[in-house]
């Protein structure tokens, strides 16, 4: 019996802001309901932002566990970085593993609700 990943659920106190962020970062479609925002982007499982009024953002890497994070492969790390930060991401590290010569590596961010994610050059 094959098991497939159909969705990733992300808690947030402000689902409007968090849903808009993931939609802007990943593209595709955004379907809001009063308690959930569903982001369907090509080639990905559905990203579901779930209302969690008492949500406290992880304080990673300097404090509490990140709980989980998402990794996204990108062809152009510099462009993906601009897209992420313009959408509302915060870089969690002031420097990263990207080399100027190869423009490859990994950059680590947090969504507006504080959920860590990485952009990795492919």
Image (spheres, grey):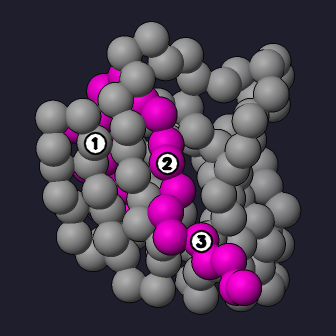
Labels 1 and 3: the sequence-earlier one: 3
Q: Can you tell which mark lies on residue 36?
A: 1
Q: Residue furthest top?
A: 54
Q: Is residue 3 magenta?
A: yes
Q: Is residue 11 magenta?
A: yes
> For the residues marked 3 and 2, what is the alpha-carbon distance in whole angstroms?
11 Å
Q: Position of residue 35 (x, y in %)?
A: 24, 34
Q: Is residue 118 visible?
A: yes
Instruction: Tell me the quadrant of the picture where the N terminus can be found.
Output: bottom right
Q: Quadrant of residue 53?
A: top left
Q: Position of residue 26 (x, y in %)?
A: 39, 69
How many discs appear? 3
Location of mark 3 (residue): 5
Q: Can you tell which mark lies on residue 9?
A: 2
Q: Quadrant of residue 82?
A: bottom left
Q: Which residues are magenta?
A: 1-25
Name the residue nearer the viewer: 109 or 31.
31
Q: Is residue 27 above or below residue 75?
A: above
> For the residues marked 2 and 1, what is the alpha-carbon distance in whole angstroms?
9 Å
Mark 3 closeness class: few <14, some 14–19, many ≥20 residues within 10 Å: few
């Amino acid at each position: 019996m094959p098991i497939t990943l159909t969705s990733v659920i992300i808690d947030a106190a402000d689902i409007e802001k968090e849903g808009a962020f993931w939609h802007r970062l990943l593209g595709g479609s955004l379907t809001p309901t009063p308690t959930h925002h569903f982001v369907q982007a090509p080639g990905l499982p559905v990203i579901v932002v779930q209302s969690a009024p008492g949500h406290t953002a992880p304080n990673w890497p300097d404090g509490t566990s990140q709980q989980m994070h998402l990794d996204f492969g990108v062809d152009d790390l510099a462009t993906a970085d601009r897209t992420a930060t313009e959408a509302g991401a915060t870089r969690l590290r002031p420097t990263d593993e990207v080399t100027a010569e190869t423009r490859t590596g990994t950059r680590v961010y947090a969504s507006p609700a504080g959920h860590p994610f990485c952009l990795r050059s492919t």
